Amino acid sequence: MASVCLSKHDINILEKIKDPESNPYAGIVLDSSLPRDPNITDATIYERVVERERDIIRSIQSLETQLKSLGSEEGKDIAVKGYQQSLSAVESMIAEHPNYASARNNRVQILRRLYGDAMMLSDTKDNSAPLIKSPDQAERKKAVVTALSDIEASIALLTPSSPTMPISPQVARTLSMAHTQRAALYLKTARLMLSRSLDIDGTLEESKWEKLDFEGAASRDLAFGGRYGNPIAKGLAVSVNPTAKLCGQIVREAMKKEYGPSFGD
């Protein structure tokens, strides 16, 4: 069989197909000497805020342990009440420190546990087993607005102004989590919206999206999640990217026509 000879241009195109967020500055610069959060530079205040955050996380971990041991509707009722208390505690922290992105990330996690990753749809039941099975519509729509707003705020608060600007490892983790959490919401919506109705506040940009819009946005967020340190997110980015999948199929078909049906085997 004839050998395959690709030009630099061809290779660059193929690399872009593999990476939906391909650009020459894809790497990030980590500097552990930087403040762990650029918006709370006073170390004493930061430690106090983090300790409050740890208390909330410990209470959530305790709830999950209780839920596993009880394994009943009674356990779920206890968990819902406990998560709602944790939600109030996080909201109090956000009110005091609105620029602390990690707290906003935590609120999103709590909302996802209460309402599930299918919260943008009319029917929220899915394999993520939300604690609230049949939420009030207005309550669910409010949760969606809050979750998406928190993610957007977290990303805006911490994203470096240039690709070469160093960030702390803590900032990288928070950014990775924010992008990955939004990807989870978008991806679940994309996978289920053909059999369910999209049901979110009409003021949200996402209210006008189709399945491919959600898939493309999920892929971009997964790519950023991977860039900031989540290797699983990076691996998933291409597999859910509709353009990458389509281009990949086109390239494979073209190559097989050019070099024979065994190309790529």
Image (tube, grey):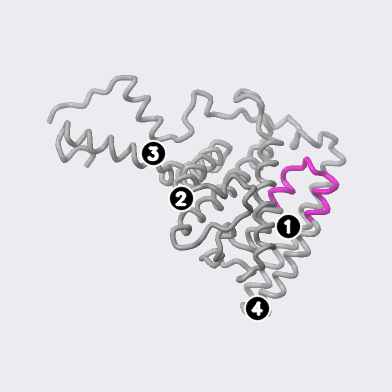
What residue is pinned by disc 3? 244
Give the CA separation, mark 3 to mark 1: 37 Å
Discs 3, 2 touching: Cβ within 8 Å: no
What residue sits 71% from the left and 53% below the top?
107
Checking the image for residue 70, the label placed there is 4
Checking the image for residue 57, the label placed there is 1
What residue sits 40% from the left and 43% below the top?
242
Checking the image for residue 111, the label placed there is none
Q: What is the three-letter code of the residue carrying label 2?
A: Lys
Give the CA separation, mark 2 to mark 4: 38 Å
Name the quarter where the N terminus is drawn: top left
- Which numbered mark, 1 or 2, is in the foreground of this view? 2
Stretch of the chain drawn in magenta: 90-106
Residue 46 location in percent, x, y? 82, 41
| Mark 3 crowdedness (10 Å alpha carbons): few <14, some 14-19, many ≥20 | many
Residue 130 lies left or right of residue 104; in this view the side is left
Secondary structure category for the residue under label 4: helix
- Which numbered mark, 2 or 4, is in the foreground of this view? 2
- In this view, 112 is above or below 211: below
Residue 25 lies left or right of residue 110; in this view the side is left
| Mark 1 crowdedness (10 Å alpha carbons): few <14, some 14-19, many ≥20 | some
| Mark 4 crowdedness (10 Å alpha carbons): few <14, some 14-19, many ≥20 | few
Mostly what secondary structure, the magenta segment?
helix
- In this view, 131 is above or below 49: below
What residue is pinned by disc 2? 211
